[in-house]
Amino acid sequence: RFWLASRQPQAGSQSQSQRRIIDMPFLDTPIVLADIPEEETRDFSPVPEGWYDAKISDADVKNTKAGTGKYISLRFDIIGPSYQGRVVWTNLNTINPNPKAEEIARGQLAKIMRATGLAQVSDTDQLVGLVIAIRVSVRHDKTYGDGNEVKDFRAVEGSSMPAASAPPAANAAPPWSK
């Protein structure tokens, strides 16, 4: 704690000294740069085009930047056959002023559901943990540089298709209406 003394003129007097306490944040233990290991170098370059087995590790409903719709943001962690540990993302525009964007999103979600055996999805949490094969392409962008796009979905080769899960209650809201 520090004491701060200041002089401020008050009505009826020339000046009056005021004191106030200022709490300054301090670390309990000093941080020494030499004690921190170097950060491992990460590769953010796009993975080559092709099919990859991946696990959906995150699925969230988000509002579009313009505020005129919603989309499901999916994160895929690649688990094989190569590039294990790399991450790619895709967005499914479930509510959009453009009906074609909604149609594409419904088609993509249907492919994910068929490939993983889901009969109905009412919550994006149902997607998290699913393993699926994704077809990745490389997108060339002058502004943002090269990146990946998820273009297609199918069941993982050699896996037995999981049984369709029981549909949730009839009054359950679709995941994009969260």
Image (cartoon, helix red, strand yellow):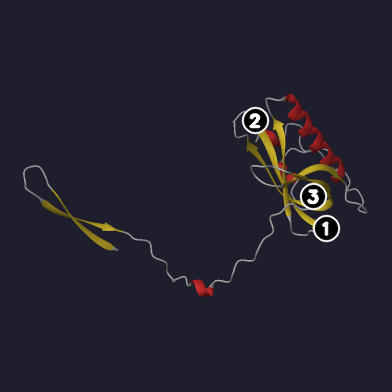
Residue in the image at 78% along x and 59% along y: 84
Residue in the image at 53% along x and 74% along y: 35
Is label 2 or label 1 in front? 1
Percent position of residue 63, x then y: 62, 35
Q: Secondary structure at mark 1?
A: strand
| Residue receiving disc 2 | 69
Query: Left or right: 142 with respect to 165?
Result: left
Percent position of residue 158, x then y: 93, 54
Q: Label 2 vs label 1: CA separation?
A: 34 Å
Q: Amino acid at mark 3?
A: Leu
Q: Earlier in the sequence, mark 3 or mark 2?
A: 2
Q: Label 3 vs label 2: CA separation?
A: 26 Å
| Residue receiving disc 1 | 80
Q: Amino acid at mark 2?
A: Gly
How many numbered marks are there?
Answer: 3
Q: Quadrant of residue 152?
A: top right
Q: Which mark is residue 54?
A: none
Percent position of residue 106, x then y: 78, 33
Contact (Cβ within 8 Å) of mark 2 with mark 1: no
Q: Is residue 167 above or below residue 45?
A: above
Q: Earlier in the sequence, mark 3 or mark 1?
A: 1
Which quarter of the rendered picture does the C terminus lie within?
Answer: top right
Q: Is residue 12 visible?
A: yes
Q: Quadrant of residue 97?
A: top right
Percent position of residue 140, x then y: 73, 43
